[in-house]
Amino acid sequence: MHETPRTYSPVAVCRAIANGELVNYYQPKVDVVTGAWHGVETLVRWRHPNDGLVFPDQFIGVAENHGLIDDLTRVVLVEALAQARRWHDSGLALRVAVNVSMSNLIQLDFADFVLDQLLQSGVAAQDLILEVTESRLMTDLRTPLDILTRLRLKHISLSIDDFGTGHSSLSQLRDIAFNELKIDRGFVHNASQDKTKYAIFTASLGIARQFAMKTVAEGVEDRADWEFLRQQDCDLAQGYFVAKAMPAADLPLWLAEWTARCAAGLDAKTPV
Ligand code: C2E
Ligand code: MG
Ligand code: MG
């Protein structure tokens, strides 16, 4: 038996993209007050012929550093939009989020590509959310800002991912009207018990409110986290307490189970 490598070579990642070995998984985002299914985040996986399911931390960095992230993002986005269209056609009004790397935002044609794909898929701009993380140190932010501003003007929603970590900083807020702020899971799970997490979580919520952004808490792992979000008036929850990321085909079964869980008391409002 051979050990799964921690990261892969650029050649291997390039081949995976070309061979269609990347697949989209989707993790539900739900309303903290009603439990209603609001949307999904697209999370890419690699169905490796030998190593099984490979997680993005083992290949996204390689793609970013070797000029492959554009092809990767395009494959993920095209499939996510096709899936969004299927959901829409089946009567599910879901908003679909796709992760975008800062390296995508230095390609001038990126906005055109996204807008073309939206048009071709027939998905409404309002139903697409792009999650942005500053994954590499950028000195010149002019091109990313131009691209994001253009997408925003076309009514695509923008989300700041991993807020609170060194990767996502307040400087992003100054220049762009983001619609959503995702509080990093490092400040969510157990925030009710941990003073530092509590402080960062509540400060992040305050910032989001001042900028009229929706708040999403990542890494909601247990009932205590869920109750904490309700107390804090966070808008949306994402995390293992609700569901792990899964193939699109598994979502109907998850929805049936989640609806039953909500009906069985998860959804009960805490009496005032
Ligand atoms: P992210 O965008 O912050 O996504 C959330 C990550 O947290 C996902 O990891 C998700 O599976 C994990 N997660 C969700 N709920 C919980 C929870 O309750 N507890 C814990 N411990 N973890 C939870 P994943 O899928 O391994 O993705 C890691 C990162 O890879 C993502 O972080 C994102 O930055 C990046 N990524 C994933 N797909 C893409 C993509 O298509 N393009 C780009 N550029 N980056 C991607
Ligand atoms: Mg994300
Ligand atoms: Mg995140």
Image (cartoon, rainbow, N blue to C red):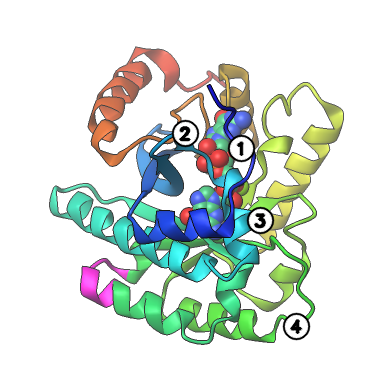
Mark found first going from the N terminus, 3 or 4: 4
Residue under numbered circle 3: 208
Q: What residue sits right under mark 1 in the picture?
A: 5
Callout 2 crowding tier (Cα within 10 Å): few <14, some 14–19, many ≥20: few
Residues at badges 1 and 3 in contact (C-beta under 8 Å)? Answer: no
Q: How far apart are the alpha carbons under marks 1 and 2? A: 9 Å
Residue underneath mark 4: 140
Tell me if label 1 and label 2 are in contact, CB under 8 Å.
yes
Image point (73%, 40%), residue name: 201
Real-space Cα separation, disc 3 to disc 4, in angstroms: 25 Å
At mark 1, the secondary structure is loop
Left or right position of 84 against 128: left
Q: Nearer the viewer, residue 187 or 14?
A: 14
**Pointer 1 local density, CA inside 10 Å: few below 14, some 14–19, many at least 20:** few
The part of the image, by quadrant, that contains residue 230 is top right
Q: Position of residue 80 (x, y in %)?
A: 33, 56
Where residue 148 sits, quadrant-wise, is bottom right
